[in-house]
Amino acid sequence: MMKMKEALGVVLFSLTFLTSQINGQEAVLHISDASSYREYCVVHNHSWTPLPQLLDSALQYQLVNLTSTLLCNSSGINPDVVKGKALVAMRGECDFSQKALVAQSLGAAALLIASSKSLVTPSANDSEYTKVKIPLALMRYRDFLEAKKVFGEGMQASLYAPPYSKIDPSIAVILLISMVTITLGGFWSGACERDRLNSLSGGGGESKANGGELSLYSPLKVIVFVALMCGMLVLMYFFYNILVYVIIAIFCFASASALFSCLDAVMDLIGCNSLSVSVRNRSFSVRSVLLAAVCITIAVIWGVYRNEDRWIWILQDLLGIAFCLNFMKTISLSNFKICVILLSLLLVYDVFFVFITPFFTKNGVSIMVQVALGPDASGEKTQGNMVEIPAEPQPPAEKLPVVMRIPRFSAWAQNLCGMQFSILGYGDIIIPGLLVAYCSRFDVWINSRKKIYFISCCIAYLLGMILTFAVMLLSGMGQPALLYLVPFTLITSVVLAGCRGEMKQFWAGTPYEVLDSPREPLLSEGRIDRSVDGETC
């Protein structure tokens, strides 16, 4: 059973990745009458037709319904009817700039283009930009029909684009989640290592001390592991619509099991006793049964409501944190050499599939982003400041549940058009987390009361994350976080071990099976080059 869970965890881990955060040109259409109002999503081009940032600063226009025409010319339209007002015309046949110039020649104060297709950022030839002097935006045709039904013909409209900071508070929440997960996972791994050594010294036996852990100790196994990750990612790219449901099922099982392990450890920590009940000569732990029921229920609720963006991200993040914690505790790297090989290969993997693969794909989107966001998430994959929003309700697009998701708190207009999220892949927590866990175990081996390696690696991870977000915000592009996290954590660990004179032992690690005296640490605090009986470093 444990081997199956480990295998499922490895499969899910192989699909972890970094995805992009998109900056849009969404704005708000405020429609009102004397007693009520409603607000709708519109898309504009700020560099072409900027809008005021606040509703109080926005001009109010009377809406004129010209959805019976495409407004490619002014024939049949009385200028006196539209002068100083906002026009609503249908999308089609001619360019946005031509419609705007026609509306402008008629004396209109603003132009709204109703679309039954997707809403895209309006653009024009460079020569046309300076000619258009009135605000221009696209709105959903169904929104206009709804507003017409609610307010009738006497609609008053205002257009504004609320400002939102690129440094959204959701980034701080993502950073907090990653740091808490890294710290708890490393601490848990170190505590398990201490229990393991105590169990061995007390004659508990190797199997009891193992606790279901799986150790990576061979460079060949690491290479095969990374190769399998590459193969899984490529398969997901070509067979996404089939394999996504397999991954969702695996996530439900693996995350429920991981949540059970985490909650069970918390119960042990607070000293909650486990009452046993015998049924047909079989003993059952009441605590374990109740915890299993809770964890399975949470996983099932997530599986059923996984596409409810408004609130399901809470459960996904909870299950994701548990999955990362359990992975860091279960999978251990035997020495620093394995850490270097694994993290270096995964760094190359991350950079290649984010930056290199766009040159080979048909749509110019990296395989990593395509798999992360799904083939139907075209609006989220749009580059730069260009956005694309569906004009009609779309069936929910299945996405892989391998990212932490936090709604962007400051993007009010963007959330009106569709919820925007700051996201971080599980791999950006787990991969450096395996090194943090190794440092925590090494602190146990050398009996470091200050946990110098563990704390230093956590600080290095924090600095790497801060640099990742800084580069992302400055460049306006999603970044492969491992490009910054791997060098920060590896170099910090190397420098610390070198300064303390423990590089030889830190590099070689501790093969448990040849330790003759588990009660003794590998090195005493502050001492170097000490051999352990039966061990060659």
Image (cartoon, helix red, strand yellow):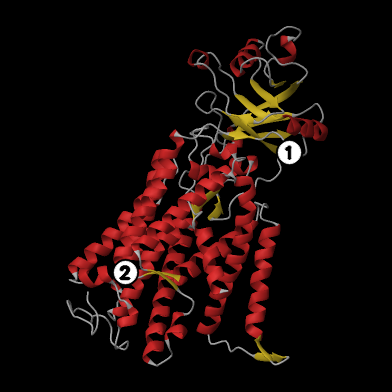
Q: Point out residue 169 in the picture as x, y percentages from the top left corner.
A: 49, 52
Q: Name the residue nearer the viewer: 256 or 225.
A: 225
| Quadrant of residue 337 within the rendered picture | bottom left
Q: Name the residue nearer the viewer: 458 or 195.
A: 195
Task: Name the residue beneath numbered marker 1.
Answer: 37
Q: Point out residue 6 in the picture as x, y percentages from the top left corner.
A: 52, 68
- The 10 Å Cα crowd at callout 1, few under 14, some 14 to 19, many 20 or more, is some
Q: Point out residue 409 in the picture as x, y percentages from the top left corner.
A: 55, 50
Q: Residue furthest top?
A: 75
Q: Check disc 1 and report its element: helix, strand or loop.
A: strand
In the rendered view, tell whether residue 52 sits above or below residue 445.
Answer: above
In the rendered view, tell whether residue 437 sits above or below residue 140.
Answer: below
Task: Name the residue beneath numbered marker 2.
Answer: 335
Q: Name the residue nearer the viewer: 36 or 172.
A: 172
Q: Which mark is residue 407?
A: none
Q: Which quarter of the rendered picture does the N terminus lie within? A: bottom right
Q: Are marks 2 and 1 in contact (CB under 8 Å)?
A: no
For the point 79% across and 27% down, the residue is: 154
Residue 32 left/right relative to 128: right
Q: Amino acid at mark 2?
A: Asn
Q: Check disc 2 and report its element: helix, strand or loop.
A: loop
Residue 403 left/right relative to 447: right
For the point 29% across and 72% down, the residue is: 509
Residue 352 visible in image: yes
